[in-house]
């Protein structure tokens, strides 16, 4: 129970995509409260299209690159480049790694986080996807450092991602369209933090069912 | 609201297809990218190319300002969503005439990221790219944080000035300088009376109660900064002029260009009702209206409301504003 194989793990991305597509209306609804209400539509379109181009034998590397290509070339918005960079940098990090163990996965997430931070300009506390991603990765790393196994570290990541997502309710947006609302952006979940939580949760669940 | 729709997912492609058909004298579709509209007169060897881009749903912006001596290519995004970096990059490549390309766009998180990435890609191709980021929307941030303000209808003046400067044979830094001066001299405000609905979402993305108006509303249905009781057209016009000019310390006698645009569902006659008062108020504050523009120049689907943009002019901007240009959205 320490690793998954890269080959054949591409469908994890399809499972994440299914959750995003299922939550299309929900993501658009929360985005519409302080943004323009297109987050779910664009996310579902991008993840859905990518899912159709991934096959069961694909490596996780290839599946993430496919998703990145669709997001960058066909979706646009702000989530296109942000998640596009994230999945592209994660795919670049994995490359042809055969076995994805806890350390490899953590380093892959770190590469993805750095990709997001390079293209965007947000910090933790700005009411963005970073408020999910940063604490989730911290929780994952410290669980491993504390002796947890891969599955337990993934559980810690999931829990921290949900807490991080929920922390955006009380935040005032500092970046993106909702930033112009100041105090009026308080009291609503951030759509990017919410979709990021779905992605990280999808990774955790997808990996746990494949651990050998 | 009832709509003319096929599959909502196809609405942008169908809009672009119809637009290119209707205005084939002025524009064409890029053979490489169905989300890039190119002027029939671009590229021109030795001339700076002008590129913009933005989400759809603002027609005639952004595609409608593609034409002669105006914007050379437009990257087209989904409804209210930034175009991809690839589309910005393809637009840059489509208009490069060896003298560099000016990307003149609005200050939105997605556009900033996608243009940044497109600029990197263009650099690899050896194309010199520089940018001006429009930030004319007064209510979106305080003056001291102008770099945080949104770009709205002032972008049209920025494109007009940048396009005319490029047409005069100016260098890339000169075109950037003129476009930057244009947007620096612009102040805008939007007033919303009713929300809009993305067809794929299916319900309004915010509400405006009957009898209320939102001052400082954004071009994507971003709620306004202040909700007040709706007053008479004259009182609303007075408030718009006050907000715009209080933000802009203009010397007595300054000549200005004025643009009043509907947001999509406001009848054009009401725009003239507003304009009648707006010009009187502007002149009462010691300014002179050099050239007005009134109509649906920059819309937000079927939002009810209007925007006011005032651009302070000098001799250079006056000449560039009046310079010959032709596009579906604006002809001078």
Image (cartoon, coloured by chain):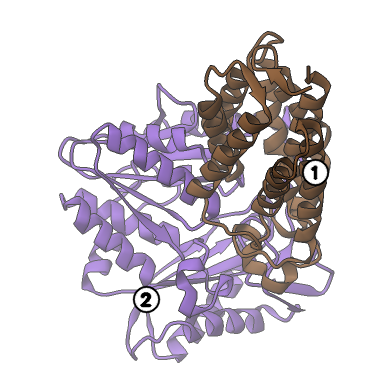
Instruction: State the image quarter where residue A154 is shown.
Output: top right
Tags 1 and 2 touching, CB below 8 Å? no
Which of the chains is brown? A
How many labels were placed on the picture?
2
Q: Are marks 1 and 2 on the same chain?
A: no
User: Eyeballing the image, is A191 above or below A5?
Assistant: below
Circle 2 Cα neighbour tier, 10 Å, few/some/many (<14 / 14–19 / ≥20): many
The extreme top residue here reads A57
- Quarter that holds the N terminus of chain A: top right
Residue B49 image label: none
Name the residue nearer the viewer: A178 or B57: A178
Locate residue B224, reporting x and y percent.
68, 69
**Residue bearing mark 2:** B256
Q: Is residue A201 above or below residue B264?
A: above
* Residue A44 image point, x, y percent: 72, 32
Task: Tell me residue A118's x, y (percent).
Answer: 48, 47
Depth order, front residue of B12/A10: A10
> Which residue sits at x=65%, y=23%?
A100
Of all chains in the rendering, the one displayed in purple is B
Task: Name which quarter of the figure residue B122 lies in.
Answer: top left
Q: Is residue B262 visible?
A: yes
Dot 2: element: strand
Residue lying at 47% horizontally and 83% vertically, measured from the top left: B245
Which residue is tagged 1?
A156
Q: Is residue B268 above or below residue B37?
A: below
In-front residue for pair A150/B147: A150
What's the residue at 77%, 33% (across, down)? A149
Of tags 1 and 2, which is closer to the observer? 1
**Label 1 residue SS:** helix
Q: Position of residue A134 (x, y in %)?
A: 66, 51
Q: Residue at x 68, y 11 (%)?
A: A55
């Amino acid at each position: 129970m320490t690793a998954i194989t890269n080959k054949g793990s591409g469908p994890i991305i399809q499972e994440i995509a299914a959750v995003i597509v299922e939550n299309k209306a929900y993501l658009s609804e929360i985005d519409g409260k302080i943004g323009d209400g297109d987050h779910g539509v664009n996310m579902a379109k991008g993840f859905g299209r990518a899912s159709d181009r991934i096959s069961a034998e694909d490596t996780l590397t290839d599946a993430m690159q496919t998703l990145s290509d669709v997001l960058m070339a066909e979706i646009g918005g702000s989530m296109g480049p942000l998640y596009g960079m994230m999945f592209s940098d994660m795919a670049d990090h994995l490359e042809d790694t055969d076995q994805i163990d806890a350390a490899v996965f953590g380093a892959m997430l770190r590469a993805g986080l750095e990709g997001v931070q390079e293209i965007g300009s947000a910090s933790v506390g700005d009411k963005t996807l970073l408020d999910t991603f940063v604490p989730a990765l911290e929780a994952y790393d410290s669980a491993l450092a504390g002796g947890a196994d891969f599955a337990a570290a993934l559980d810690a990541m999931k829990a921290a991602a949900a807490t991080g997502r929920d922390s955006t309710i009380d935040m005032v947006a500092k970046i993106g369209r909702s930033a112009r609302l100041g105090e009026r952006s308080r009291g609503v979940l951030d759509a990017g933090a919410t979709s990021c939580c779905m992605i990280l949760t999808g990774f955790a669940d997808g990996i746990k069912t494949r651990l050998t | 609201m009832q709509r003319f729709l096929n599959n909502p997912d196809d609405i942008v492609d169908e809009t672009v297809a119809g637009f290119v058909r209707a205005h084939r004298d002025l524009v064409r579709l890029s053979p490489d990218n169905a989300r890039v509209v190119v002027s029939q007169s671009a590229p021109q060897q030795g001339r700076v190319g002008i590129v913009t881009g933005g989400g759809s749903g603002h027609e005639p912006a952004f595609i409608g300002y593609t034409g002669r001596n105006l914007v050379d290519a437009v990257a087209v995004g989904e409804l209210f969503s930034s175009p991809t970096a690839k589309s910005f990059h393809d637009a840059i490549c489509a208009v490069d005439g060896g003298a560099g390309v000016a990307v003149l766009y609005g200050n939105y998180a997605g556009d900033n990221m996608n243009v940044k990435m497109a600029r990197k890609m263009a650099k690899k191709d050896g194309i010199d790219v520089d940018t001006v980021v429009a930030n004319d929307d007064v209510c979106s941030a305080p003056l001291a944080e102008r770099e945080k303000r949104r770009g709205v209808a002032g972008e049209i003046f920025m494109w007009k000035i940048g396009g005319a400067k490029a047409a005069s044979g100016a260098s890339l830094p000169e075109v950037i300088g003129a476009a930057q001066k244009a947007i620096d001299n612009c102040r805008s405000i939007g007033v919303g009376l009713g929300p809009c609905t993305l067809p794929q979402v299916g319900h309004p993305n915010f509400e405006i109660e009957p009898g209320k108006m939102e001052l400082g509303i954004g071009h994507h249905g971003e709620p306004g900064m202040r909700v007040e009781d709706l007053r008479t057209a004259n009182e609303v016009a007075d408030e718009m002029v006050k907000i715009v000019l209080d933000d802009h310390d203009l010397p007595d006698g300054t000549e200005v260009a004025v643009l009043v645009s509907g947001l999509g569902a406001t009848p054009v006659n009401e725009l003239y009702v507003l304009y009648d008062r707006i010009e009187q108020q502007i002149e009462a504050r010691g300014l002179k209206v050099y050239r007005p523009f009134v109509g649906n120049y920059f819309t937000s689907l079927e939002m009810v409301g209007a925007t006011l943009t005032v651009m302070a002019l000098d001799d250079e901007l006056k000449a560039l504003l009046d310079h010959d240009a032709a596009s579906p959205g604006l002809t001078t």
